[in-house]
Image (tube, rainbow, N blue to C red):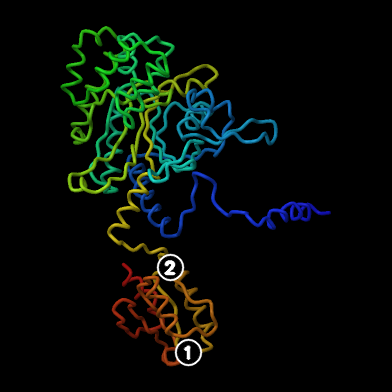
Amino acid sequence: MTAQAVLTSQLKPHQEKPNFIIKVPKGTRDLSPQQMVVREKILEKIIGCFKRHGARGLDTPAFELTETLTEKYEDTFGLMYDLKDQGGELLSLRYDLTVPFARYLAMNKLKKMKRYQVGKVWRRESPALVQGRYREFCQCDFDIAGEFDPMIPDAECLKIMCEILSGLQLGDFLIKVNDRRIVDGIFAVCGVPEDRFRTICSSMDKLDKMSWEDVRHEMVAEKGLAPEVADGIGEYAQCHGGISLIEELSKDPRLSQSQLALQGLGDLKLLFEYLTLFGIAEKISFDLSLARGLDYYTGVIYEAVLLQSPGQAGKEALNVGSVAAGGRYDGLVAQFDPKGHRVPCVGLSIGVERIFCLVEQKMKASGEKVRTTETQVFVATPQQNFLRERLKLIAELWDAGIKAEMLYKNNPKLLTQLHYCEKTDIPLMVIIGEQEQREGVIKLRSVASREEVIINRESLVAEIQKRLS
């Protein structure tokens, strides 16, 4: 029995199951041609911005060695998709694009790089599809690796975030900024044991979704933190502002006991100077509740959230959470390097699915139509036996770089061809029949206005290009 026959025999019982459900796996989805048009436009804007800032493209495998990933996501490795051993290597699907980038830098002994990457990542968490949260989703990352003067690359990352979110016209947004050293400093002066920093940090990271009372309850009841320690954290965690808050905290008698926190505050003061020069300081809020759950952050951290405008207050807002986030991770590359060489890094990630959800919702509300093809010209005939002429004509258009289509029929009806053009919004139609062939001309029709002109056969391409430009 051949391998194919064995496979067919194994598949047959499935085909005969009366209750077999055909569906996509939980937390994933198909994207229709209409959705792909919208998605490609979003990606084009994001990648265009990354390139404008001098980034180079990079791609890494969809899966990595499990060992590469598990050590870097202590709190989250339960969310990773492990693959069956296929040949002596334990593998897992990548959880984000940051760890593969750090591995790439260490493996290739690179000390400097400005890169962007767009790719799918996988997380085995409970999907919330209305919020644009999936198990398989696309990330768009921009990172600057290398030893530079403080806060210049960090400020550029925040500028990029502002450019992208403004360019996508999603409405008003705010970027919350904090520093991991300030978070750790707060924990230290409030009396959190050092070995509990990360777990308390992951509770604090939920403040964008939960009230302080609920987060405090988790810290005290579930994680065993003393109530007075949690209350001390709460006093700081509920503060947000700008440069004046940074100056106020620098003089705070309790917080200034932490050298780490003072370093973080000093860097943030410099960061706000640069953000003012970039003209984006009003979009940034220094927010002490921001913690970012991932373990690898070491300095400045940030997260962009969309704000509900007063005009929408009456309507039900789509809660999509953060749409972009990132920060500084100076120690991650060293974890992959056998000699522990450090390569400081800072970066950002744009949450495409959440943005996509919003753009789709706005388009539905406005009734905007999406064209799923980019065809510019349709080659038609009103008569029979003109297939060969149409084929010659369409080849000429394709060779000239013009996007063209025709119906795959020997003798299509002219009305059918006209309806097809109107339905698919093709702007121009080229018509050839007996009379045109005899006179060495072509009829060029504007589909929207139904206006027709006669032009010479040899000047067809030039005329079309002129109209399209």
Give the spatial CA distance, label 2 vs label 1: 23 Å
Please give the label number shown on residue 383: 1
Going by the picture, which residue comes out furthest to the right? 1
Q: Of 199 and 424, which appears nearest the observer?
A: 199
The x, y position of residue 43, in whole percent, is 38, 48
Question: In which image quadrant can residue 308 be found?
Answer: top left
User: What secondary structure is marked by label 1?
Assistant: loop
The answer to whether 1 appears left or right of 348 in the picture is right
Residue pictured at 40% horizontal, 10% vertical: 194
Which image quadrant: the C terminus? Answer: bottom left
Q: Where is residue 417 in the image (x, y as percent from the top left)?
A: 44, 80
Secondary structure under badge 2? loop
Amino acid at dot 2: Lys
Disc 1 crowd, CA 10 A, few/some/many (<14, 14-19, 20+): some
Residue at (63%, 30%) from the top-left corner?
A: 90
- For residue 441, side relative to residue 77 (left or right): left
Q: Where is residue 445 in the image (x, y as percent from the top left)?
A: 35, 80
Q: How many marks?
A: 2
Q: In this view, does 1 lie above or below 451?
A: above
The image's mark for residue 403 is 2
- Kindly check if marks 2 and 1 are in contact, taking CB atoms under 8 A apart as contact: no
In this rendering, would 446 be left or right of 65?
Answer: left
Q: Pick whichever, 254 or 141, lies toward us.
A: 254
